[in-house]
Image (cartoon, grey):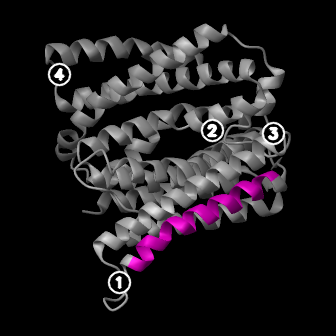
Amino acid sequence: MKYLSILLVLVPIVLVMEWLGVGGHSTMFVLSALSLIPLAAVLGNATENVATYTGPKIGGLLNATLGNAAELIITIVALREGLVTVVKASITGSIIGNVLLVLGAAAFFGGLKHGVQKFDTQVASVNASIMALAVMAMMIPAIFALGNEQHRPTDQEIVRLSDGTAIVLIILYAAYLAGTIFLTGGSKFSVARSSETSAETEKAGMSLPMAIGVLVVATLAIVAMSEILVGALEPTADAWGLSDLFVGVILVPVVGNIAEHIVAVQVALKNKMELSIGIAIGSAVQIALFVAPVLVLVSQFVGPSPITLVFNQFELVALFAAILITVMISIDGRSNWLEGLQLTALYVIIALAFFFMP
């Protein structure tokens, strides 16, 4: 992760270019996207340091809340700009990206180095089952909206159904946190990054005030870079011939979660596949139970109109594939490089399908 810090120089460069009004849309898009990579890493590191002072329970809650902060900020900014298609597509893209790309890359590189890697099936199955439940709940508004005319709810009813589903999912997320952190003490079922264990065994690299200060500065920098990224998104997508759907499903999730992706591969290379799976599947759980519902509720006050949990049939198929793969991976408690390659290959095929979709 230390090599990512070199990219921090892009933050002042991008700000100066934006202030001077120099650089084309494509240049600003690429540079602002690259600047988000080290900022996401800094945000994650500061969060981990704060967790060492607050203890495993509060630290776990903090990690769960801020785990997808970069992407959440990007999507809220995009929502404010009226990019509803990009925002909704990013929800799907984040889930399939974590389950297929992140987990696939971790299993592939970890398997190449260590052969067959083992992990606790109980931990993986808990995360997989809660993610499956959340994604299935997210599918219900779409299923009703795509039904026949006789039984199809009105647009207003779909909005209310999505809002109700979002509230239920957030309540489920709170129960998930209570069950994994407060009731079990964080000893077995880790949240997102299994940071409860690491927080107890590793010493903080900075003082608490400094960690909080870095957390605040990193968040503000991410907001600034997200503003520039979203501002250049549409003209760049048009120039590159990319659809809003492809940008939302592929580009936004990869940029927003790049630091977390790198960590998943790094721990797999250290033969800690259980932690790697916790990062990949746990992050997908965060998206389904927290980020997506928050975006639905925030859209009531930000953006031109409320967004719903109605995804198109292509996104539904991708989500179903993600659920199926997650359950299958969790069954035997083993992974190898071939399974990782298969997961990655499926992600590439889905990415190609969305690329050629008009």
Q: Which residues are magenta?
A: 123-144
Image point 25% across, 26% down: which residue?
A: 28
The disc, 3 or 4, on the residue closer to the chain's N-terminal end is 4
**What residue is shown with label 2?**
64
User: Badge 4, how many Cα within 10 Å: few under 14, some, many 20+?
Assistant: few
Report the mark closest to the observer, 3 or 4.
3
Instruction: Specify the quadrant that holds the N terminus.
Output: top right
Marks 4 and 2, Cα distance to the nearest angstrom?
37 Å
**What residue is shown with label 4?**
23
Image point 70% across, 34% down: which residue?
A: 60
User: Badge 2, how many Cα within 10 Å: few under 14, some, many 20+?
Assistant: many
User: Badge 1, how many Cα within 10 Å: few under 14, some, many 20+?
Assistant: some
Residue 101 in the figure: left or right of residue 10:
right
Give the amino acid at mark 1: Arg
**What residue is shown with label 1?**
152
Secondary structure found at label 2: helix
Marks 3 and 4, Cα distance to the nearest angstrom?
48 Å
Residue 294 within the segment the image draws in magenta: no
**Which of 182 and 276 lies nearest the eye of the viewer?**
182
Residue 158 in the figure: left or right of residue 196:
left
